[in-house]
Image (cartoon, rainbow, N blue to C red):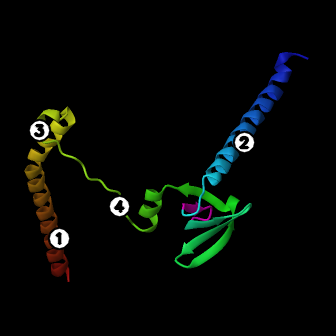
Amino acid sequence: MSIVTLLPFIVLIGAMFLMTRSAKKKQQAAAQMRDEMQPGTGVRTIGGMYATVKEIGDETVLLEVAPGVHAVYAKNAIGAVLADDEYNRIVHGDEPDTDTVVPDDASSLTESDEAAEVSEDAKPNLTKKAEAAEADVEVKKDDKADGETEAK
């Protein structure tokens, strides 16, 4: 047999090897993620439900899906273990703290900060353009309404 006849089989075996290796890595990552679960951790199930872990068993997890409402799920049903800030943002609508510290002196400004300052000066011109565009839209609406009245 020549190498040309064996080439399709070699390619097929190589592709199968890569696919099984990828699937195995995904399974290991999912198992590691589930091992990170602890009581009090926020999770998302594979069905898209957000809940808080209350107890962890060998094959099951007790989840609190609403205050005082508990449900038992298989560990494999956990799709993602969420960080506390992400869970609170999604479930409770909490916004992360985005307080920025402004330096006391301007010497520590970067070029992008200076560009932002320049764009702040340009805002009045943008506001005027936006107001003009809104006025133009209102005039067109009035013209259209007048045309409809005349047609009747």
First in sequence: mark 3 vs mark 1: 3
First in sequence: mark 4 vs mark 3: 4
Q: Are marks 2 and 1 in contact (CB under 8 Å)?
A: no
Residue farthest to the top, as pictured:
2
Alpha-carbon span between mark 1 and mark 4: 39 Å
First in sequence: mark 3 vs mark 2: 2
Circle 1 — which element? Answer: helix
Alpha-carbon span between mark 3 and mark 1: 50 Å
Q: Of discs 4 and 2, which sits in the foreground?
A: 4
Q: Position of residue 30 (x, y in %)?
A: 65, 50
Residue type (three-letter) at the residue carrying disc 4: Glu
On the image, numbered disc 3 is attached to which residue?
A: 105
Question: Looking at the rendered structure, which numbered label has been put on residue 141?
Answer: 1
Local packing at callout 1 (Cα closer than 10 Å; few below 14, some 14-19, many 20+) is few
Q: Is residue 137 left or right of residue 86?
A: left
Question: Looking at the rendered structure, which numbered label has been put on residue 24?
Answer: 2
Local packing at callout 4 (Cα closer than 10 Å; few below 14, some 14-19, many 20+) is few
Instruction: Tell me the quarter of the image containing the N terminus.
Output: top right
Circle 4 — which element? Answer: loop
Q: Quadrant of residue 77?
A: bottom right
First in sequence: mark 4 vs mark 2: 2
In the depicted structure, whether residue 63 falls above or below residue 133: below
